[in-house]
Image: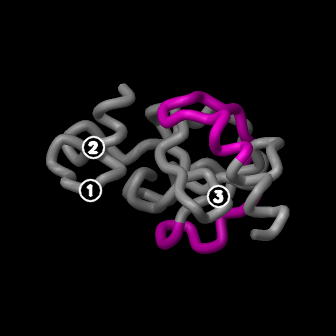
Amino acid sequence: MSSVHESWDDLRSRLRLGQRLTGTVVRVPRPGAIGVFVDLGLSVGGFVDVLLLPFDAARWPVDGTVTEFEIWWMDERPQIRLKPVDPAYVREDFDGWVAEENSTAAERWRQSA
């Protein structure tokens, strides 16, 4: 196993779903289509998926935005999946979407909230 994955495994073991982290949006490659990349000041970056962001890309956080995020998902890939804490940066129907969503991520979110 490479040292990058060992480092990620160690970091991941100290983090928990729902934990809040402050980060800076560093890249919005295709507003409205992919999501946003976030610098968390850690050895791995964060990412907010388009599914969690507002439908109107004009409401998405832009490069340089510093805000709080909650850890939404972590797996073997060295990247932390995030959900913005500020409701202005979250999809408009988030609560209903989570209630209806049958994915593992949504189930874990309900358990950690």
**Where is residue 36 shown, x and y percent of the image?**
61, 59
Name the amino acid type tagged 3.
Gln
Q: Residues within 10 Å of mark 3 (few under 14, many from 20)?
A: some
Look at the numbered discs 1 and 3 and tell me whether their residues touch, using CB distance below 8 Å.
Answer: no
Residue on which disc 3 sits = 79
Q: CA distance from mark 1 to mark 2?
A: 6 Å
Left or right placement of residue 73 versus residue 110 in this view: right
Percent coordinates x, y for residue 25 in the rendering: 71, 50
Q: Earlier in the sequence, mark 1 or mark 3?
A: 3
In this rendered view, identify the residue nearer to me: 104 or 101: 104
* Element under disc 3: loop
Badge number at residue 103: 1
Q: Which residues are magenta?
A: 10-34
Residue at the far left in the pictured view? 100
The answer to whether residue 51 is left or right of residue 70 is left
Task: Find out whether the residues at labels 1 and 2 contact each other: C-beta distance under 8 Å.
Answer: yes
Q: Quadrant of residue 6?
A: bottom right
Residue drawn at x 75%, y 69% is 1
Residue holding disc 2: 107
Could you tell me which residue is drawn at 25 percent across and 37 percent down? 95
Q: Is residue 102 left or right of residue 12?
A: left
Q: Is residue 19 above or below residue 49?
A: above
Q: Magenta segment: does it hold 26?
A: yes
Identity of the amino acid at label 2? Glu
Amino acid type indicated by mark 1: Ser
Q: Position of residue 108 (x, y in %)?
A: 34, 41
Earlier-in-chain disc, 2 versus 3: 3
Residue closer to the observer: 72 or 51: 72
Instruction: State the separation of the CA atoms marked 1 and 3.
Output: 19 Å
